[in-house]
Image: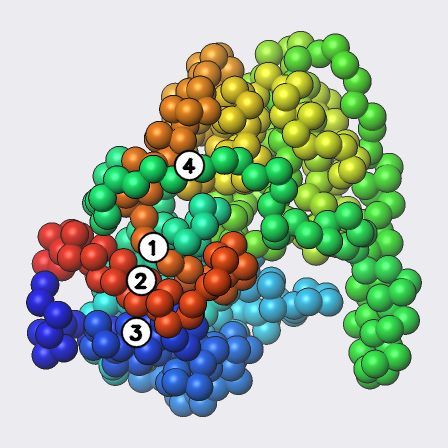
């Protein structure tokens, strides 16, 4: 593919910061952009809140067929869309109306702008970007999905969620470079996880003090949080040495790691129900809540389902995760970082979703033909070989930062230099995938 704007496809970009967006415009024929940037054609937050111009859609048979396809993903959209409702869930009818407005706006945008390629700064998980991606899949419009890596200055690229983490089939983008990777003692994004994240009396007081009109929803949220804490307290038990066990750390929800790449196991209780039925009779499953979890997606029925699993025990979120990994027979997770950590401690890992490390030695992907003993006997490589596996996978990753939260991992981070790295990486990926991305 020549770097010639006249021969490049018409591109939609979604979610890139200002400097990266400008760099992409030098590499691609960007027909439209959605971002939190003064240079974007549509503001990210306005689309997220549906604070957008909306005209009556022209519904023809092609749009009808597309809508019928996208409606199959409505439940996943509801899960993703719940991020919009910070205090209490939105009304079901309004969620559906918002779904339709999002669909119509996204469909019109893709068709009227004659979009031929979509570049996402992240795996779609905000609502409108999810709908955009699903419409693109239906219409056959190729996409590039980026996902920031835990390895500094690297991000993964994929064309679809189903391919995410499949490094064996991904193209090489750069030459082999030894990373010298070492597992960090703590993850930067877990700062502040020591405090209770659920809505407390202090949160209620300061919320109403700042914005008195928020009293009704604030009281509802406080009631949900109180209920959440009571349910956790009722089910929490102490860790007891003796039985072999699987450690299952719960994900923070709602979040990308479940809603976008967890598949049906965005319902984490379903994963626990499934695993509970397959374990040998002398095994337990120890579950630990994510330290940052709030009352969202943790209502009474969540714990009612959990309580029926007699070989499952809920531990305090203050239990040391590394100690649990070390003492376990293995780790089960949807896509979590605990699985990556466990490999370095020599523990087999079971993943239910599209974890970025799912092809590494010692990792078992749950699916048809799953054998519990095979999982328990799947020993990871030694840490040095794990790092070698990682370095081979990193040849297929992009260079740079697509998620601004990860900039702090780069000493002396330079926004302009980073923008060029990101744009070049995406361009290399498209060059390497031309045969599969374009007909």
Q: Are marks 4 and 1 in contact (CB under 8 Å)?
A: no
Whole-number angstrom distance, CA of label 3 to CA of label 4: 30 Å
x and y percentages locating residue 96 in the rendered image: 53, 69
Q: Are marks 1 and 2 in contact (CB under 8 Å)?
A: yes
* Location of mark 4 (residue): 180
Q: Are marks 2 and 4 in contact (CB under 8 Å)?
A: no
x and y percentages locating residue 130 in the rendered image: 42, 63
Q: Residue furthest front?
A: 412
Going from N to C along the chain, the mark reached first, 1 or 3, is 3
Crowding at dot 3, Cα within 10 Å, few <14 / some 14-19 / many 20+, comes out as: some
Going from N to C along the chain, the mark reached first, 2 or 3, is 3
Whole-number angstrom distance, CA of label 4 to CA of label 1: 16 Å
Task: In the rendered structure, find residue 105 and report the number of the disc placed on it.
Answer: none
Q: Residue at x 52, y 48 (%)?
A: 257
Task: In the rendered structure, find residue 399 and report the number of the disc placed on it.
Answer: 1
Closer-to-camera residue (94/349): 349
Image side of residue 252 versus residue 143, left or right = right
Crowding at dot 4, Cα within 10 Å, few <14 / some 14-19 / many 20+, comes out as: few
Whole-number angstrom distance, CA of label 1 to CA of label 2: 6 Å
Going from N to C along the chain, the mark reached first, 4 or 1, is 4
* Location of mark 3 (residue): 23
Q: Residue at x 21, y 72 (%)?
A: 27
């Amino acid at each position: 593919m020549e770097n010639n704007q006249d021969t490049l496809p018409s591109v939609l970009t979604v979610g890139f910061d200002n400097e990266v967006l400008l760099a992409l415009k030098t590499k691609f024929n960007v027909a439209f952009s959605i971002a939190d940037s003064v240079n974007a054609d549509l503001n990210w937050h306005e689309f997220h809140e549906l604070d957008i111009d909306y005209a009556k859609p022209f519904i023809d048979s092609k749009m009808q067929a597309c809508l019928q396809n996208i409606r199959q993903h409505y439940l996943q959209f509801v899960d993703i869309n719940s991020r919009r409702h910070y205090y209490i869930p939105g009304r079901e009818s309004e969620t559906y109306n918002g779904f339709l407005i999002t669909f119509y706006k996204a469909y019109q945008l893709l068709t009227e702008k004659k979009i031929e390629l979509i570049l996402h700064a992240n795996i779609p998980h905000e609502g409108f970007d999810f709908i955009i991606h699903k419409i693109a899949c239906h219409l056959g419009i190729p996409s590039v999905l980026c996902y920031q890596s835990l390895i500094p200055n690297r991000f993964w690229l994929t064309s679809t969620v189903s391919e995410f983490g499949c490094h064996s089939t991904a193209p090489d983008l750069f030459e082999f470079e030894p990373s010298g990777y070492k597992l960090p003692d703590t993850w930067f994004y877990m700062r502040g996880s020591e405090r209770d994240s659920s809505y407390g009396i202090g949160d209620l007081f300061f919320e109403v003090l700042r914005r008195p009109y928020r009293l009704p929803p604030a009281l509802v949220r406080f009631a949900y949080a109180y209920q959440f804490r009571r349910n956790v307290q009722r089910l929490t038990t102490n860790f007891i040495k003796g039985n072999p066990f699987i450690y299952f750390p719960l994900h923070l929800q709602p979040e990308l790691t479940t809603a976008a790449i967890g598949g049906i196991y965005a319902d984490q209780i379903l994963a626990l129900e499934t695993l509970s039925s397959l374990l040998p009779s002398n095994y337990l499953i120890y579950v630990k809540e994510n330290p940052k979890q709030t009352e969202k997606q943790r209502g009474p029925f969540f714990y009612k389902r959990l309580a029926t699993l007699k070989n499952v025990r809920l531990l305090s979120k203050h239990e040391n995760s590394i100690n649990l990994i070390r003492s376990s027979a293995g780790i089960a997770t949807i896509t979590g970082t605990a699985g990556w950590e466990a490999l370095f401690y020599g523990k087999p890992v079971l993943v239910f979703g599209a974890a970025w490390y799912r092809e590494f030695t010692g990792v078992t992907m749950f699916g048809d033909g799953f054998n519990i003993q095979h999982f328990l006997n799947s020993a990871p490589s030694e840490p040095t070989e794990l790092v070698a596996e990682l370095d081979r996978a990193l040849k297929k990753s992009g260079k740079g930062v697509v998620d601004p939260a990860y900039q702090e991992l780069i000493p002396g981070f330079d926004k302009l230099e980073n923008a060029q790295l990101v744009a070049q990486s995406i361009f290399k990926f498209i060059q390497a995938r031309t045969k599969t991305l374009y007909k």
